Image: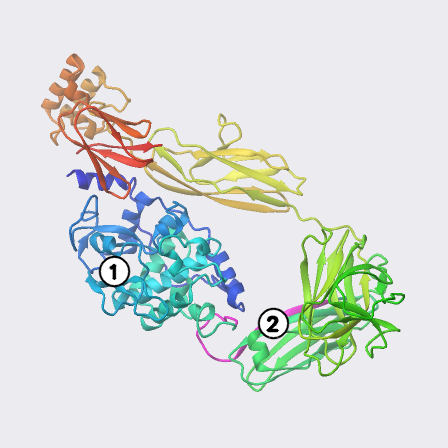
Amino acid sequence: MKKNLLNLMLLFVAMMSLQATAAIPSGYYNTALGKSDQQLMLSLHQKIHGHYMIYYSKLWEKFKTTDCNGTTIIDRYANTSFTYGTNQCSGGYSGVGDCYNREHSVPNSWWGADQDTMYTDLYHMYPVDGWVNGERGNYPFGDCANGTPKGTGKLGTCTHSGYSGKVFEVADEYKGDFARTYFYMVVRYMDRVGSWTQSYGNAVFTNSSYKHLTPWAISQLLEWHRNDPVSTLESNRNEAVYGIQHNRNPFIDHPELAEYLWGNKTGNAWTGSASTDPVISTPSNGSTINVGTNTGNGVSKEITVMGVYLTKSLTVSVTGTGFSVTPTTLTAAAVNAGTTITVTYNGTATNATGRLTISSTEVNTSVTLTATYNAGGSGGDTETIETWEGCTGYGAYTTTFIQGHAFAWNTNNVGIWSGDANANGSLSCRFGKNADSYIEMAENVTDGASKITFYAAKWSSSEATPTLQVLYSTNNGSTWTAVGTCQPNTTWQQYIFNVDVTGNVRFKIAQTAGARLNIDDIAITNNPGTPVIIPRIDISTLAAMEAEQNGASSVVRGTVSGVDNNEDIILTVDGNFEISLNRMTWSQALTLDPSGEVFYVRLADTGTVGDFYGTLTAKTSRVTAHADLEGTVVAKPVTPGDVNMDSKVSISDVTTLINYLLNGSTEGVDVIAADVNTDGKVNIADVTALINLLLSGSREMRGWDAYPGDGSIQVINFTKENLEVYDFDGKLRAVVVGNVNVKLPAGIYVVASDNKSRKVVVK
């Protein structure tokens, strides 16, 4: 009885099952469309991170929604028919079928057992046979053809190429499930998973690339993923977890995503479909692109072109007066890998329109172009040109400081030469044969920059085609921001890069591929306009709150920070939560200083047992920020004899108990506390027991209590029964008789009897 009661008490509150949705929410993955590789992973991460966190003790009841067929637990390690709520592990186990446990399919020891969000993430938490779980230990998943049977799985030496350590192999019907679990964990925790290398974690996870999986793990998991497709069981579980955590497993919704991140479609842009039909994903067909404003020297816009499954070369063309494009042809391979084209507007129409068309015999994409003309520029912009004229004494590749005609430069593998065919004037700058050349301004342009242009070409037709990257810095060269790239060919031509930087700025032009080239007439158009500052509001992460029914709630401290903000910040909260600036006056709306303030949050309604979720919103007229709130109200412990629930045992409880026995009304009566002699029923014998308690203070009737001590649990036990101490994994840690101190490591424990339990935190 104790174990059953304890398990119920560990489930602080029962949450109503959320009905699974029938399909992926419309537009859920739209932000990932057209992305590939690392950018695809990042966009998926941004969509599914920040889910609702669950208490570890509440996983038991969540399994009823996620992993239960009626009242039977779905066990993926042994296929044992466990009954929900009655076969939970609360102590030891001796074999298959004893009980089911809460399994971290990605062992928590791999990340150091920190109880972070991943500690209770349902997408990798499964109810499984406790004994098999113990046998699996912390070993990775993998194939082991000659392994020792453990439930429906096997444990033995890995037989998959690339790893020879011990692994646990699950049944074939669940291999894809666990592979997609691991894919989810990499994406959901991409900012942390690279450090999950303790114990055997280094066999699976790595920080050597954004993929965060070792080569053999990628091969093994993809094999399981391909051979065991998504089942109805797995899809239903995805919907159930989504109803609880409010995030999804992308690899269940779109199994092909695994191929785009780790498999045979890396480098391709994801189109949102497993289809292999050729398609141009970027730019979107029917979209509109603004090229910019021509202030007299033309304006250019670099446009990314990406597609998948293309096999035919593409033609690029524009219509509309003043518009031109380069290049005019693209190979299918270049577009599949992602490439760029440059559209230029040299017209004089105030509001010009044109059309960009990218087509082949298998695809056709059409985009509307817009541009404007303003001969006066942006507030009378001026142009400063580096011509290199006047530089002397070089004529060789050096890594040195060069005083140019207009600016001072730091250089690497660069020289100033006369007599080169590619030059505007007598001198030009030449980059060396190795792809490590660069020129970097050693001084600032003080009026900002709206555009940088230069002329460039390969030094000779036999040179490998170079790639130049243009970058700028607003902090004196401490950090650099990329503007764009170009690939000069044998034609001496101008390249234009638009920027929008105010204040101090300097530029860097770096060679990242190819061989020798010339560069000349570097022109910087200033941008003296007032910078547009967009204010920002940040809300700190808020911990979950706990409260006892009809008791005080824990209080969580948070901060709102306003950056470049000059308006009062209105802080509001919804749901069963209250906020305060001083922890004395509570409300659901506060006015904060523009720079932000410290605030406090608590549960407002502590009379109802259950989980509560809410949203904290910080808002001005220009910007809004949100933070999620979570709290749990647990049932108030029962005190035998406190029949009228006034938190004390007195003669009024005798009166309440007698009235209850006479008229049967439960209003204002705690029926469990009315069972004073704890015989499972309420009758006249309980009146006698209560009177004896009040008259004699019988030690047996004083019950028991437990308190945290210094590294221990202090138990005062006046009853004749044994008390049991459990940890939050349901493991029995001690049996208590009488008044004792139980020495235990720091952690959360539950002391339980047949009719009462108490949570104790040992520090």
Name which residue type carries label 1.
Arg
In x, y percent, where is residue 662? 14, 23
Q: Say which quadrant the N terminus sits in.
A: top left
Look at 79% across and 68% down and name the residue there: 415
Q: Earlier in the sequence, mark 1 or mark 2?
A: 1
Q: In the image shown, does 605 or 156 lie closer to the viewer?
A: 156
**Mark 2 surroundings: few (<14), some (14-19) or many (≥20) residues within 10 A:** some
Asked where in the image residue 482 lies, by quadrant, the reply is bottom right
- Residue 639 disc label: none
In x, y percent, where is residue 359? 61, 82
Q: Can you identify the residue that label 1 sits on?
A: 76
Query: From which residue to which does the magenta span run?
Result: 269-291
Q: In the image shown, does 601 or 97 lie closer to the viewer?
A: 97
Q: Say which quadrant the C terminus sits in.
A: top left
Q: Nearer the viewer, mark 1 or mark 2?
A: 1
- Circle 2 SS class: loop
- Residue 283 disc label: 2
Residue 137 to residue 422: above or below? above
Name which residue type carries label 2.
Pro
Look at 20% across and 27% down and name the residue there: 673
Look at 53% across and 43% down and name the residue there: 617
- Circle 1 SS class: loop
**Mark 1 surroundings: few (<14), some (14-19) or many (≥20) residues within 10 A:** many
Asked where in the image residue 490 lies, by quadrant, the reply is bottom right
Q: How is the image coloured?
A: rainbow
Does residue 198 appear left or right of residue 483 in this picture? left
Residue 692 to residue 406: above or below? above
